[in-house]
Image (cartoon, grey):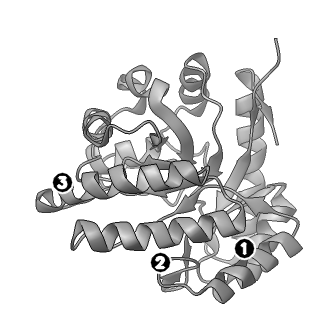
Amino acid sequence: MTKVEIKLGCFTRPWREYGIEAAAAGMKAAGFNYFGPMSMGPTRLIDYESTPEEVDAVGRTVRDAGLDFSIMMATYPLTSVEEGVAALNRELDYVGQLGARHVMTGGASQPEQYDTYYDIMRESAEYALHKGITLMLKPHGGLSNTTHDTIESWKKVNHQNFKICYDAGNLLYYAGEDPMAHIREIAPIVGGMCIKDEIGGQQGDVMVTPGDGLVDFPAVFGALQDAGFAGPCAVECLSGEALDDINHQATRARRFLVETLTGVGYTVD
């Protein structure tokens, strides 16, 4: 039986005060091959207001560091379905421009925005399908607060190209939910994983290097593997504030995750 290979990457969030070049260099030195654009200083590296030239510049920096793109975090207004779809589809164009194939969304926090979110996802999931891009929802409070909430939101979108980006740390942080309590219910619809640990339970701390907190990653990945999961995974958070410490934590995180993933039967790129 051929083992499934997991493409293991890292998001830029830990290096948000140090810039894209430092983030890319830190990821590569730690052994990661995949780069996930997210927070960088006060803004995101790429969003729907970026220009094609800015997106090209990000792409060059990432590839010059010897990295490819992992999961990308999308932003879009929830003021109306029309505005949200236009913004998200523009960002999906940029995702395709960079050669990425998975986009993560954070849902909506206000109940009056929920239906707008579902409608945006339904329309943009179809647009993404024709570009070969998978659209995903992560547990992030609001309409994706608990595992049950996340599954119900997935059902309401009801599109073949809409999946879940599993985030065990966020289930602890937002809902105080043990990630293992319902993981086998959600595992069959997981298309990617945002790797995040957590300490302190509900409203605790997520700036924790994977393996140092409350998430039982061997059990999480074991359950996902049993369900046939084969999607990309990217580390969102690390401990440390100084650049050297962040880079050290990135190395620790990758070592831990490679051991964990191979221990449950995966191979790792």
Q: Look at the numbered disc 1 and give the secondary structure of its residue.
A: helix
Q: Residue at x 73, y 84 (%)?
A: 57
Of circles 2 and 1, which is in front? 2
Mark 3, residue position: 115
Q: Residue at x 78, y 69 (%)?
A: 26
Q: Is residue 26 above or below residue 166?
A: below
User: Sequence-wise, which precedes: disc 3 or disc 1?
Assistant: 1
Task: Tell whether 140 sits left or right of 136.
Answer: left
Left or right, 116 with respect to 92, comes to left
Where is residue 202 drawn, in percent x and y?
29, 48
- Between the C-alphas of marks 3 and 1, the distance is 36 Å
Most extreme residue toward the top is 1
Mark-to-mark CA distance, 2 and 1? 22 Å
Q: Position of residue 269 (x, y in %)?
A: 82, 43
Q: What separation in Å lies between label 2 and label 3 (alpha carbons)?
A: 21 Å
Q: Between 91 and 217, which is closer to the camera in this rendering?
A: 91
Secondary element type, mark 2 = loop
Q: Which residue is mark 1?
A: 23
Quarter the N terminus occupies: top right
Q: Which mark is residue 48?
A: 2
